[in-house]
Structures are given as C-alpha cells and as structure tokens.
Amino acid sequence: MSREKKGWSLVLLGLLLAVAAAGLGYATLYLDLAGIYLGAGVIGLVMVGICMIDPAASLMINLAFSFSAAHLSRWLTHDAFPVGVVSDVLIYATLLGYLIRRVPLGPTFRSFVHSPVVVFFLVYLGFGLLEAFNINARSTSGWFVGIRKMTSTYMLLFIAYEVFKDKQQIWRFIRFTFWGCVVLGLYACVQQAVGLFGFERDWVMSDDIRFGLIFIDGDFRKFSMLSSPMIFGLLMAAMVVFYFIVSIPEKGRAAWVTRLGLLPMLLGMLYSGTRTANFIMVVGLGLYILLTIDKKGSRILAGIAVFFMLFVLYVPIYTNATLNRFRSTFQGTQDQSYLVRETNRHYIQPYIWSHPIGGGLCTTGEAGRQYNPGHYLAGFPTDNDYLTKALETGWIGLILIFWLYFLVMRTGIRAYFQVTDPREKYLAAAITCCLFCYYVASYTQIALGSLSDIVIYYPFIAILVRLTEPARPSS
C-alpha cells in the first residue's frame, strides 16, 4: 500500500474511532448493557478495519485486547463477553486484509514452512484433525472448538512471521509488550494497595471454587486485568526473565527504563501468590546463566542470585503473607493441593496407557462437561497442560507435543549461537528462556492456551524462526 493511500486510510480510521468513542459514551449513559454491546461493536469494527490495513498493528491490537478483555468483561458484562471469539475475528480479519490488498504471500509461506518447527506445528495440527474420528469422544462440538483454537493460533504464528520480516517491527512489538506488562503489573500493585474493586470482589465471590482459589490465608491473590492469578503470575514471571535478559546489552536511559519496569512486574508476580511463577522465574534465569556461563557477567549474576535467594529464604520476617508464600515454593513442603494433584495423576494413568489417541479434544475438566457430557473424563481436574494433552490426545499426542517443544528450544539455542549481532543474540536467549519458563510451568499448571499468553508465545516463536534464517531482508 502506498504512503498516500495508507495516510488516507489512517485518517478515515481516526474519524471512525472518534465516532465510535462518542457512540460508546452515549450508549453507556443512555442504553445500559445493550448500549455497551452496541458501542463495543462499533469499536470492534474499527479495530477490524485497522487489522485489515496494518498487520503489524493487528499484533498489537490482539495483545492489548488479550491483556484487557477479561477485565472489561468482568466490569461491563459480568464476565459474559465472548473474548475468544473476538480474538479469532481479529486474526481472520488480518488474513482477509492480505487477500483484499492482494499481498503476495507465496514466497513468505514457502519460507515459513521451511522451518522444522513450523513443519511440526502442521504435523500436530494434522493429528488434531484426525481426532475428529476418535471414537472415544461423545460429540464433535468439543473437537471443533479445539481445532478452532489451534488453527487461529497457527494463523497468528504466520502473521507474526510475515510482519517480522522487518526487524524494526520485532523491536516495536517487544516495546509494546513491555509497556503492556508494566500496566498489568502496576494495576496489580494498585489492587494490593487499595484492595480489589467492587466489581472484582463480586466476581471472585460469585463462584465458590473461584473464591477458594483466590482467597487464601486471609488475603486475595491478585490477578490484575487477566482472568486468574495463575495466568497473571506466570505471565509476569516469564516477562521478568525476558526483559531482564533483553536489558543486559542496552545502555543509557533505555536500560534504566527497562529495568525499572521490571519492578511492577516482579511485585505483580509476588502478589499473584502463584508458587509456580516463583519457581519458573528462577528456572528461566538459571537457563540463561547456563547458556552464557562463559561470560564473566553471568557468573557474577549466578553468585548474586544465590545470595539473594538465601537472604529471602532465611531473613527473619514471618508476618508477610507474600514473602511466606514465596518461601514455601522452595522449602520442599508439599501442600494439600499438590498431594491431591499427584493422587489424581496416578489414578488416571491406566486410562492414558489404554487410550493411545486419548479421549478426544475438550473432554476433560469443565470443557468436557460442556461439550462431552457423560464422558469418562468430563469434569476430571487435569490441573496441568501435559496431563490434559495425555488424556485428550493420548500418549501419542503427548510425545508429539514434547517433540514440538524440543524443536522450539533447539531453534532458540541455535539462534543464540548463530546470530552475530549482540542485541539479537540476547533477544534469542531471552525468548528461549521465556518459553522454557512456560514449558516448565506446564507440569503443574494450564500454562499455555489463554489469550494473554498465546499473543506472546507464537510471535516469540516467529521471532526465533526469523533469527535462524540466513537472510532477513528489511522492508
């Protein structure tokens, strides 16, 4: 698209956005809930238009939406807004924009599928399609939902890969993500300082199970604008690892701004009360030290980290609930919830061995009750990604996902040792350690799959694929 045409398009979108803002204000004041939906629909059309015109902006719109969707849904619609559908619409609109603007995607696609990681993503998608014929599933509705999510996320991977052919777009996305994470961390700090707002407290108390998971030891775990403390805590931990590593080669004001932004992220992680988040932050930084052990700075960092951990674990302060919960992660104690999860895993292992392709997509947990009522796995609390995949896609599917994660990690490590630009080298290390955090967290939590992590997870993989290519022309 020419600069002149793009300028007129942005002017038109600006006018539409102004009209949408005025309409939303009027609707909120005079039309109540129906007006909110109407105003949101108008703004949504504007966002769809932007996605169709500018794929780079589409990535940022998706990220901003995923970071705020759960909060807006709780606030405006009592948690009834179909956030997943909206995210899919934004992704499909971006691809439709490519077709309308007749962008030649053939060369990009051929380069895209040349990566072993992408090839195996497609293999895993093919295995998911074969799950439609799984005789153990009670209906195809759950399979359709699972495939829809898988397909839309892979489309996001392709869009990110196409956008990141320009290296400047990579750093723009990283900066935008940084400020989004800072906002999430700051909001959690506000929740900690003044308490949950009324609509947030009502949301927590509207469900007994949710209340039991969030209100612990006389205090509410903080979830910021996301859908749960666990999702928020894991995101903050992974982003602390990522931006700490990215900030190492930076100089001057940029370095200090990035490191200062780590503080609300770190506090937000602690306020979430997610033990797994504490652990994966240490694991992610440990992997970075292992990758760069030949550097003097890494060895110094390892010594400082050990001293800091010992100080936090043994400093004689026992009245702070956040500090006590952090300590419990590394003190070897097994709480009751952990023992229950272990019991469930041992109980369900015979089913995994006897069902090599699993029980079918969306057959476990609450999704199983909704899409496959009466299924043996419906309502079973899997509690972690690997057990979910073992039950729904069998031990064959679990092997495939392990191999996929191995290829992603191999790509990241190769990128670190292959690139020569110091800034890109640290970027490769940061992404590899960040993704490793999520893979480790998947052993104890449903770490991957929510809107707020897929909008980072797949673009990060796209960056790694771009970094390992022999040539990346700038547009």
Image (tube, rainbow, N blue to C red):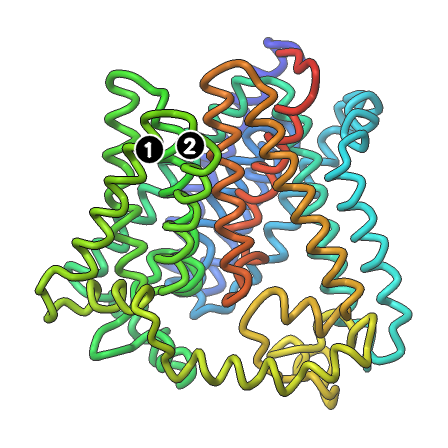
Is the residue 456 above or below the residue 100 in the image? below
User: For this rendering, which residue is in front, 45 or 163?
Assistant: 163
User: Quick one: label 1 or label 2, which is nearer the N terminus?
Assistant: 2
Disc 2 marks a residue whose amino acid type is: Ile
Q: Which residue is mark 1?
A: 299
Across and down, in percent, residue 250 comes to 34, 20
Q: Is residue 72 visible?
A: no
Helix, strand or loop under label 2:
loop
**Residue located at (43% from left, 27% from top):** 294
Q: Which residue is mark 2?
A: 293
Left or right side of 168 for 357: right
Q: Quadrant of residue 418?
A: top right
Across and down, in percent, residue 66 comes to 50, 50
**Residue located at (75% from left, 23% from top):** 101
Left or right side of 320 for 356: right
Across and down, in percent, residue 399 comes to 75, 59
User: For this rendering, which residue is in front, 462 or 226?
Assistant: 462
Disc 1 marks a residue whose amino acid type is: Arg
